[in-house]
Image (cartoon, rainbow, N blue to C red):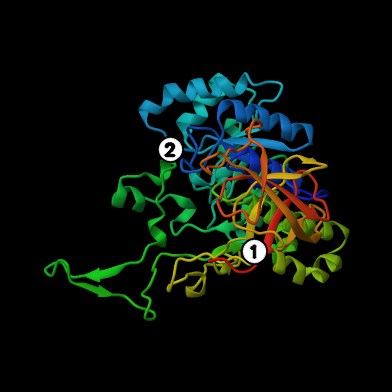
C-alpha cells in the first residue's frame, strides 16, 4: 500500500508535560499547543504529584479556555487487577464533557480495547512504551482506530521519514525532542523492578540507571572493585539528556507532527523555560530558517537555564556513541534557581509560594512568555506568621509581618518588586545550582 507523503503547511504541535495544575498553567502561559498530564492512577509517573479528579477537570477547562489541548496518560502495562479500575477510569474521563481530555495516551492492547469499548469516540495516541519502531506497527494501530503513534526513541530521522511515507496522510507522528533519555530502549526497563521491586512499567521507576556501580567477583562477597573513569567512580548506565533545539528544520522535514518534551516530574520553571524556548524557535522557523538560525545562541542560552545533564541528539542521527553517556556523575546542572510563580497581584504586592530562598535587596529576573527576562529588585517581603513563628500560609486572620528573606521553601509570601510583575510570571535568579 502506498500513501501520500504528508505536506506540512503548519508548524508541528508543541506538547509539554505537567505534573500539577501549577505546572500546567505555566506550560499554557509559556507556549504549549498541548499538555499531557496523569491522573492518580494508570500513568507512568506515579511519583509525580499528578492530578486529582477535581484538579483534572479544572485544569482541562483552564487549558481549553486558552485554546490548548490536554492529553491524559493511561500507559501502564496493565495486570488483570488493573482492568476493572481502568474501565471505571475511562468512563470518568468520558463523562467529563464538555471538558473531557482531547486524547488518551495508551500502550497496552488490553487498555486500548477497554477504552474503545467504554469510550468509542475517544482519540487514542499510542505511547512510546509500545515500542513503535516500524511503519507496519503504525498501520496496525491506525487500523484499530488510533489517531497518533509516539515513535520509539531509538528511531533515526531517516527511519521516521520512511514511516511518514508509508502511513496514511491523516495519521500523526509524535516524537520526543527534549528531556531525559532512558538507558532502556523506549523505556521498557526491568532494572528498577529487579533491584527494588518498583516497576518502571507501572509508573514506579527508582531510576537505578543513575546510580553508581562497582564490580564484585562472586566468590569474594563484599569485596568491591570500582569501575572507574576517574577518582569519582563511574555511572555506567547514565545517559545524557536529549536536546534538539538546534535541529528543528530536520525534525519538521522528517514529517513529525508533534514535538514532545519529556518531564512530568519537572518544576514549573523547567517547563516554562523549555516551552518558551521551543515555542520561539518554532515561531522563528515559521518566519524563515534564516531567522531561526540567527537566534541560535539565545536558544542555547535559555535551554541551559533549566536543569539538565549533558545534551545529546539521541538516536536521531544514528546510534549514539560513548559521548552520549555520563560516566563520572549523576548530577543535574542549571544556570538558574527557581524562586516561585506569581499568583494574585494587588496594590500591596505580589503573592506567591516561594521555592528557593531570596531576600530584600536581591536582584532577580521576571520571566515573560514573550521571551523577555526583566531585571527586578526585591524591595519588600511580608509573611504571615503565627505567635510561635510557624508559617500561617494564606490564613487571612493572621496579619502580614515584614521579613528580610524567604528562607523556607513552600512558604506563602507577599513581595514588592520593581518593576511590578503580572499574574503567572515566573521568578528566577541566575546562578548554577547543582
State which quarter of the image contains the N terminus: top right
Q: Residue furthest bottom?
A: 230
The dot on residue 213 is none
Name the quadrant containing residue 158: bottom right
Measured as percent of width and height from the top left, residue 27 is found at 69, 46
In this view, the mark in front (1 or 2): 1
Q: Label 1 neighbourhood size at 10 Å, few (<14), some (14-19), many (20+)? A: many
Camera-side residue of 62 and 262: 62
State yes or no: discs 1 and 2 in contact (Cβ < 8 Å): no
**Residue at mark 1 to residue at mark 2: CA–CA distance:** 37 Å
Q: Secondary structure at mark 1?
A: strand
How dense is the environment of label 2, judged by Cα within 10 Å: few (below 14), some, or many (20 and up)?
many
The residue where tag 1 is placed is: 336
- 269 and 41: which is toward the camera: 269
Relative side of 235 to 307, left or right: left
For this rendering, which residue is in front, 266 or 153? 266
Residue 94 appears left or right of 221: right
Q: Dot 2 lies on which element?
A: loop
Up the image or down, 47 lies above or below 58; here it is below
Query: What residue sits 54% from the left and 20% below the top?
Result: 117
Q: Is residue 283 visible?
A: yes
Q: Earlier in the sequence, mark 1 or mark 2?
A: 2
Where is residue 424? Give x, y as percent.
74, 45
Q: Position of residue 290 (x, y in %)?
A: 85, 68
Which residue is farthest left? 219
Q: Position of residue 236 (x, y in %)?
A: 38, 68
Q: Is residue 255 visible?
A: no
Label 2, on which residue?
77
Does residue 4 lie above or below 90 as drawn? below
Amino acid at each position: 500500500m502506498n500513501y501520500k507523503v504528508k505536506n506540512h503547511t503548519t508548524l508541528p504541535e508543541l506538547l509539554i508535560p505537567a505534573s500539577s495544575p501549577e505546572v500546567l498553567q505555566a506550560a499554557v502561559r509559556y507556549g504549549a499547543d498541548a499538555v499531557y498530564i496523569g491522573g492518580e492512577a494508570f500513568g507512568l509517573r506515579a511519583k509525580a504529584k499528578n492530578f486529582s479528579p477535581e484538579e483534572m477537570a479544572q485544569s482541562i477547562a483552564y487549558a481549553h479556555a486558552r485554546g490548548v489541548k490536554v492529553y491524559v496518560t493511561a500507559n501502564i502495562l496493565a495486570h488483570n487487577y488493573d482492568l476493572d479500575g481502568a474501565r471505571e477510569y475511562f468512563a470518568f474521563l468520558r463523562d467529563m464533557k464538555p471538558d473531557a481530555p482531547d486524547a488518551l495516551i495508551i500502550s497496552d492492547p488490553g487498555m486500548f480495547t477497554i477504552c474503545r469499548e467504554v469510550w468509542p469516540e475517544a482519540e487514542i495516541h499510542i505511547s512510546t512504551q509500545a515500542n513503535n519502531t516500524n511503519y507496519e506497527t503504525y498501520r496496525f494501530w491506525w487500523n484499530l482506530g488510533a489517531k497518533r503513534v509516539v515513535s520509539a526513541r531509538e528511531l533515526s530521522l531517516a527511519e521516521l521519514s520512511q514511516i511518514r511515507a508509508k502511513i496514511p496522510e491523516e495519521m500523526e507522528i509524535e516524537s520526543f525532542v527534549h528531556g531525559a533519555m532512558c538507558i532502556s530502549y523506549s523505556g521498557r526497563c526491568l532494572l528498577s523492578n529487579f533491584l527494588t521491586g518498583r516497576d518502571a512499567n507501572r509508573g514506579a521507576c527508582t531510576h537505578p540507571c543513575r546510580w553508581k556501580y562497582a564490580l564484585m567477583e562472586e566468590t569474594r562477597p563484599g569485596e568491591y572493585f570500582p569501575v572507574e573513569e576517574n577518582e569519582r567512580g563511574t555511572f555506567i548506565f547514565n545517559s545524557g539528556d536529549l536536546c534538539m533545539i538546534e535541529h528543528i528544520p530536520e525534525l519538521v522535514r522528517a514529517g513529525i507532527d508533534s514535538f514532545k518534551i519529556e518531564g512530568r516530574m519537572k518544576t514549573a520553571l523547567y517547563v516554562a523555560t523549555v516551552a518558551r524556548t521551543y515555542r520561539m524557535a518554532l515561531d522563528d522557523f515559521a518566519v524563515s530558517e534564516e531567522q531561526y538560525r540567527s537566534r541560535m545562541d539565545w536558544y542555547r542560552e535559555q535551554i541551559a537555564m533549566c536543569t539538565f545533564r549533558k545534551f545529546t541528539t539521541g538516536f536521531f542521527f544514528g546510534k549514539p556513541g560513548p559521548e552520549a553517556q555520563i560516566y563520572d556523575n549523576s548530577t543535574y546542572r542549571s544556570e538558574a534557581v527557581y524562586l516561585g510563580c506569581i499568583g494574585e497581584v494587588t496594590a500591596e504586592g505580589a503573592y506567591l509560594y516561594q521555592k528557593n530562598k531570596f531576600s530584600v535587596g536581591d536582584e532577580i529576573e521576571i520571566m515573560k512568555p514573550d521571551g523577555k527576562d526583566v531585571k527586578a529588585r526585591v524591595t519588600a517581603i511580608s509573611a504571615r506568621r503565627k505567635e510561635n513563628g510557624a508559617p500561617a500560609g494564606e490564613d487571612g486572620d493572621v496579619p502580614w509581618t515584614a521579613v528580610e528573606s524567604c528562607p523556607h521553601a513552600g512558604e506563602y509570601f507577599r513581595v514588592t518588586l520593581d518593576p511590578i510583575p503580572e499574574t503567572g510570571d515566573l521568578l528566577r535568579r541566575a546562578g548554577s545550582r547543582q
